[in-house]
Image (spheres, rainbow, N blue to C red):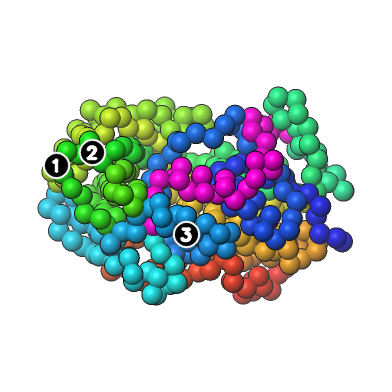
């Protein structure tokens, strides 16, 4: 069987654009379908650890991101009220020395813009909400809500936790609400007044909640925070993944935290919130000519800051597998066998919310390189 002539990627988020960039680099024909009518500067802060940066280096984006984002001094973990340090991991020069790539804090939109620059516009169709998929022996028919249709040899579902492609792979599997909510805000650092934050990525740990705070730019002119706390989530729907939050309520919820935390929250012009969702590892990531990556197959809580990094790894390994194996069934099987154990381990670790609170060796996470990891799984394929 010859290599696929055309690949349709559903979703132009971080995973979809990384997959498209990697596949274009490897000489594949790719079209990306995105339901949003245009790209806007939405989202929040994001952490790119060395494992992700090595993947992004392979598609030519490392230098651009290093010029934009902050290389934090340390991963600083402190008690919520006193600020007592419970663990501190050096991140700046040490990350490159140990793992061969930097650690960055940046705005998610800056990462998305960089990825978009690696995928020419003629490969991207916006305003294309997937409404149907029909598999045939020789390809897949795609239909969209606006009446458009398309055909591809293979379809990649990079369409998030409420994936339409996943419905076709294993049937509908709704994610489970955890009863916890994240509030987040990104705003100009000038709003902090005289307060100057340290240049670390700082996590303040409370008994039943936490908050992460860091600058998102090398210029130190933008601040981001993200909380995690218990809250009734009956308001949450697939459409309300990022609803506007009540800032006064949030201030009250963190009134017992350190004065610096209270000042950072108080300076925010507004906050958004989203319900934390989890899902057990799926029985399979592919069916026929369809395959999943990222949150479509392994959504994870943000407590390791590895959701996007894991998705980026998926995209690179999937691109490599499709380039290495002429039969897409073999490529999909190797991709899943290589990626699923690692993603499942990350899901479990993230769910426990202990990462970096005490002394932690992150080598198994940060030392990974999706461009060079073997495509042969450790155990024989069934």
**Residue 63 tag number:** 3
If the image is split into quadrants, where does the C terminus sit? bottom right
Q: Is residue 334 above or below residue 104?
A: below
Nearer to us in this view, 66 or 48 = 66
Taking the magenta stretch, the answer to whether it contains residue 108 is: yes
Label 3 or label 2, whichever comes before in sequence order: 3
Marks 3 and 1, how far apart in space? 32 Å
Label 3 CA crowd tier, 10 Å (few <14, some 14–19, many 20+):
few
Q: Residues within 10 Å of mark 1 (few under 14, many from 20)?
A: few
Task: Find the magenta span and give its range.
Answer: 104-132
Can you say whether 279 is above or below 312 in the image?
A: above
Name the residue at the top extreme: 146
SS at badge 3? helix
Residue 212 falls inside the magenta stretch: no
Q: Residue at the spot x=76%, y=29% of the render?
A: 148
Which residue does the numbered mark 2 point to in the structure image?
A: 190
Quick check: marks 2 and 1 in contact, CB under 8 Å?
A: no
Looking at the image, is mark 3 or mark 1 earlier in the sequence? 3
Q: Position of residue 96 (x, y in %)?
A: 40, 70
| SS label for mark 1 | loop
Left or right: 142 in relation to 260:
right
Residue position for label 1? 194
Locate residue 58 relative to residue 62 in the image: left or right. right
């Amino acid at each position: 069987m010859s290599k696929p002539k055309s690949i349709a990627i559903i979703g132009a988020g971080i995973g979809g654009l990384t997959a498209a960039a990697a596949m274009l680099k490897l000489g594949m024909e790719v079209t990306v379908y995105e339901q949003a009518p245009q790209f806007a500067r939405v989202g929040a802060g994001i952490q790119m650890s060395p494992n992700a940066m090595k993947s992004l280096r392979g598609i030519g984006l490392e230098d651009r991101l290093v010029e934009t984002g902050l290389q934090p001094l340390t991963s600083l973990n402190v008690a919520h009220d006193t600020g007592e340090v419970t663990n501190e991991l050096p991140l700046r020069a040490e990350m490159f020395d140990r793992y061969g790539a930097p650690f960055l804090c940046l705005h998610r939109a800056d990462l998305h813009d960089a990825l978009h620059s690696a995928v020419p516009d003629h490969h991207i169709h916006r305003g294309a909400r997937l409404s149907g998929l029909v598999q045939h022996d020789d390809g897949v028919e795609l239909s969209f809500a606006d009446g458009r249709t398309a055909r591809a040899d293979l379809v990649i579902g990079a369409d998030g936790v409420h994936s339409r492609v996943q419905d076709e792979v294993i049937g509908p599997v709704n994610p489970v609400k955890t009863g916890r909510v994240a509030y987040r805000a990104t705003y100009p650092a000038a709003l902090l007044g005289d307060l100057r934050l340290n240049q670390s990525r700082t996590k303040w740990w409370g008994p039943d909640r936490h908050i992460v705070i860091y600058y998102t730019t090398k210029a130190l002119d933008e601040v981001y925070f993200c909380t995690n706390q218990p809250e009734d989530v009956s308001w949450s729907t697939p459409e309300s993944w990022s609803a506007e939050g009540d800032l006064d309520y949030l201030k009250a919820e963190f009134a017992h935290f350190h004065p610096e935390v209270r000042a950072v929250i108080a300076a925010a012009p507004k906050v958004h919130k989203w319900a934390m969702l989890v899902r057990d590892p799926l029985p399979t990531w592919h069916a026929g000519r369809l395959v999943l990556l990222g949150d479509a197959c392994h959504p994870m809580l943000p407590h390791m800051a590895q959701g996007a990094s894991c998705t980026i790894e998926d995209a690179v390994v999937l691109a490599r597998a499709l380039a290495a194996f002429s039969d897409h069934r073999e490529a999909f099987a190797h991709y899943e066998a290589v990626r699923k154990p690692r993603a499942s381990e990350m899901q479990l670790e993230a769910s426990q919310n202990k990462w970096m609170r005490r002394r932690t060796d992150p080598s198994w996470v940060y030392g990974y390189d999706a461009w060079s990891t073997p495509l042969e799984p450790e155990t024989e394929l069934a």
